[in-house]
Image (cartoon, helix red, strand yellow):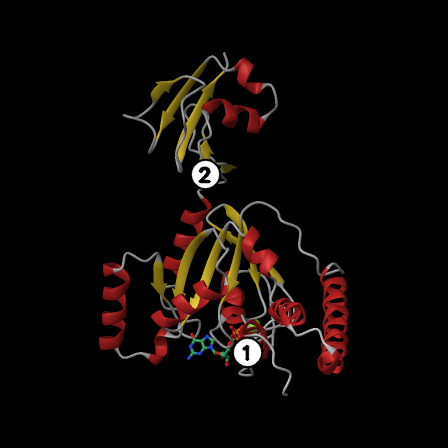
Amino acid sequence: MPINARPEYYTAEKRYLEAKTLDEKIFYLEEMIKTAPKHKGSENLLAELKTRLKKLKEKEEKSKKKKTGSKGIKKEGFQFVLVGFPNSGKSSLLTKLTNARPHITEHAFSTFQPELGTFEFQGIKAQIIDQPSLGNENFDIGLVNNADCLIYVVENFEDIDKINSLIPRAQSKKLIVFNKSDLLSSEQKRKLEATIKSKRLNGVLVSTFTNENLEELKQKILHETGLIRIYMKEPGKPASPIPLVLLPQSTVKDVAEKILKGFSSKVKETRITGPSSKFLNQKVGLSHIVKDLDVIEFHTR
Ligand SMILES: Nc1nc2c(ncn2[C@@H]2O[C@H](COP(=O)(O)OP(=O)(O)O)[C@@H](O)[C@H]2O)c(=O)[nH]1
Ligand SMILES: [Mg+2]
């Protein structure tokens, strides 16, 4: 179109044409409108761009309404969000890690809205959310930016940088899952694992088909939550099999209060055995900081 626009306009147009998400499209279309020449010869073009923008905004409004519907996900406790390209195996992984049963197909973009699953492992619970793939207009950047930890589901190292460049504002911790290990030879697996180690990546090589390393992945997920499991014990009896779950940096007082509000004022003596104790049955005060898998005995006399 011979409208003699400034270079900024053509850059915005190029980005607009390449844009994958609705968010991006709207952003660059607005840039085009801002930088388009404003004279008689470009009137039609401007009008056309504005109509296009209006339509995209209507579409955005509609998808927002959908999101706040019955599927709206409430954050409870520690939240993981799966991110990755189409067909990397996010939905398959959600099925293996949680109670959720999302739709799995060989077609790209078969997940249309976020799907919540509850991860339950060795006494700890967390939320895991399966997202529409990167590049899908229903991909929810808000979920990514609010996650406590992102789980990248990838098939190779290049995907990691590509994902990073698409979600530049994500600050949370990252766990990298290399999926489809069943497609690799043992030599390829060995190399990939060596590279994960040498790059000091928080990553693990798994297969949702053969279940390879899924237990290791669960351990890593549990570790990422930082949650602390404390086992209570009565004198002369074995420890209870079900732990109390506390936040990182919790104290003996927090444990007592978790059992019963006000209970800490009744505690006369605390004995602790486990990662936070120097020896068996160490006597500690209420301000002692507990560690995961400690066993605690309260004496109230
Ligand atoms: N070979 C192999 N294929 C897998 C594995 N996990 C998932 N797939 C396949 O990859 C395709 C996409 O899986 P899906 O979970 O829907 O991926 P999503 O688009 O990331 O949610 C499906 O055909 C799955 O059967 C795996 O561990 N190994
Ligand atoms: Mg999916």
- Residue drawn at the location 70% of the way across and 73% of the way down: 38
Any part of residue 166 in sight: yes
Q: Circle 2 sits in a helix, a strand or a loop, which is it?
A: strand
Which residue matches tag 1? 14
Q: Quadrant of residue 110?
A: bottom right
Q: Quadrant of residue 113?
A: bottom right
Which residue matches tag 2? 229
Q: Quadrant of residue 139?
A: bottom right
Q: CA distance from mark 1 to mark 2?
A: 53 Å
Picture mark count? 2
- Residue drawn at the location 45% of the way across and 34% of the way down: 231
- Category of crowding for the residue at label 1, using alpha-carbon neighbours closer than 10 angstroms: few (below 14), some (14–19), many (at least 20): few
- Residue drawn at the location 27% of the way across and 60% of the way down: 199
54 vs 7, left or right, is: right
- Category of crowding for the residue at label 2, using alpha-carbon neighbours closer than 10 angstroms: few (below 14), some (14–19), many (at least 20): many
**Image height of 34 relative to 200, above or below:** below
How far across and how far down the image is residue 1, in percent? 64, 88
How far across and how far down the image is residue 222, in percent? 44, 49
- Residue drawn at the location 49% of the way across and 45% of the way down: 123
**Image height of 269 relative to 224, above or below:** above
Q: Nearer the viewer, residue 263 or 75?
A: 75
Q: Nearer the viewer, residue 1 or 108?
A: 1
